[in-house]
Amino acid sequence: MAASAPISPTIYFGAFVHSTSLIELELSDKGAIGVDSNGVIAFVERDVENVEDVKGKYDEFKEARVVEVKDGFFFPGFIDTHTHAPQHPNTGLFGKTTLLSWLQTYTFPMESSFSDMQKAERIYSNFVSRTLSHGTTTCAYYATIHVPATNLLADICLARGQRALVGRVCMDSDLSPETYRDASPESAIADSKESLSYIRSIDPTGTIVQPIITPRFAPSCTAPVLASLGHLARETDAHIQTHISENVGEIALVAQLFPSSTSYTDVYDTAGLLTSKTILAHAVHLAKEEVDTIKARGAKISHCPASNTAITSGCCPVRKYLNAGLTIGLGTDVSGGFSPSILEECRQAIWVSRFLAMQGADSAKLSTEEVLYLATRGGAAVVGMESKVGAFEVGMEWDAQMIVLGNVDERGSRDGAFEGLVDVFGWEDLGERVQKWVYSGDDRNTKMVWVRGRLVHSRA
């Protein structure tokens, strides 16, 4: 398995880029990062002219192999804080729908078919490969209500070496299709426990895969199930993921279904589902009181700009939430989102913030530095891994991607067989190369991807 493959001490030599704060990137043109046999960063050196000089400083690395990046840079692995693996075949099929009609038209029929394990394996394997090829080293996955298919997704992530939070979806409300919902509150909890136990059995330390309790969203769950899931989360100290305030029609429906609750956020809070391990996807239309409650409970936000635009849910006011002290990462939300790429979400987050800026204060705009932070360190904090991944610091684990850009030679032609969209002419500094990658890059720029120092993806 890629997750447990033995590795030898390695020095990653060349330019590297990572976030040191929300507003600042470290840009090192000549770096050397030493990663030990456990996949942990042992040293970070800057202004290195000769890698042999670095080897001489560290006994463990005297015979280390060297991986050098040319015409590019090393960057931390992306963290996708919200996506639906079984919806992958529906990517791009949102048409003219809004959230609730889209669920009925596309989502529930696709997910309900995952009782077919051959189909599930084919789709899950393809989707995990796709996310890795886009540099995503950690992913918070929604599966389906099926225990075998949910467990299969965890198996695939473990085998491929991708960090993952994998959740069996709970939905027992009669608003869900009769053919695709939990038979009872009791069966919903029993099946969730079964999947949770299985995922912990295949990776007892949670190094690569962890279970995550997953009420789909309030309208698809009864109050007893929500409360029982809150109890299960406390009992097992598990992560939680769900949706919140994605769409105005959805919010109105929640108010109708839960008349005793003061808000959508209160529904989850009353059920004990708002904790420091909770990931709330979307959060487009939160009232100030809801923001205050989410912050007080330590719950986190997954911003999914492509999906919010595609199904016309709205523009999430990320700047307001950052100013309020909320922890935010990015999510692709496939298949509401049209791409498994967090780099694409970086662009979409910038565009959504500019749509808001054009409607009001210019301060709503997000910078390139800020969205790259959300894609890495912000996402790491959302999934509870901020001390392990998201940056290149001593003691963190080597979750990284090698980004290669296309050099244009004196004749105006590309060097080699590079097929990406980013053209570099030689006069750009490292910061400008990063900007070009953010706005024009795609998976063709992602040459190699590592998790815990293990190679999990490479492009010929």
Image (cartoon, rainbow, N blue to C red):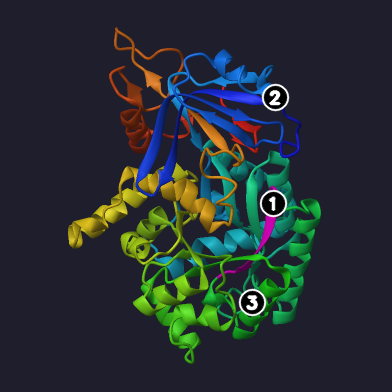
Tag 2 residue? 60
**Disc nearest the viewer among 2 and 3:** 2
Residue 422 higher or lower than 207, as above or below = above
Residue 171: x, y in percent? Answer: 62, 73
Task: Identify which amino acid the numbered label 2 is placed on.
Answer: Glu
Q: Secondary structure at mark 2?
A: helix
Residue 338 visible in the current orientation: no
**Residue at position x 25%, y 53% from top?**
354
Question: What residue do we see at 40% from left, 73% from top?
Answer: 291
Alpha-carbon distance for marks 2 and 3? 47 Å
Q: Count residues near mark 3 (Cα–Cα under 10 Å), then give few for <14, some for 14-19, many for 20+.
A: many
Q: Say left or right for 166 vs 403.
A: right
Q: Nearer the viewer, mark 2 or mark 1?
A: 2
Q: Examine the rendering and report whether any part of residue 213 can be seen.
A: yes
Q: State the residue position of label 3.
A: 230
Range of magenta residues: 207-216
Label 2–label 1 contact, CB within 8 A = no
Mark 3, secondary structure of its residue? helix
Q: Which residue is mark 1?
A: 209
**SS label for mark 1:** strand
Q: Amino acid at mark 3?
A: Gly
Task: Residue 368: give x, y in percent of width and height.
Answer: 33, 43
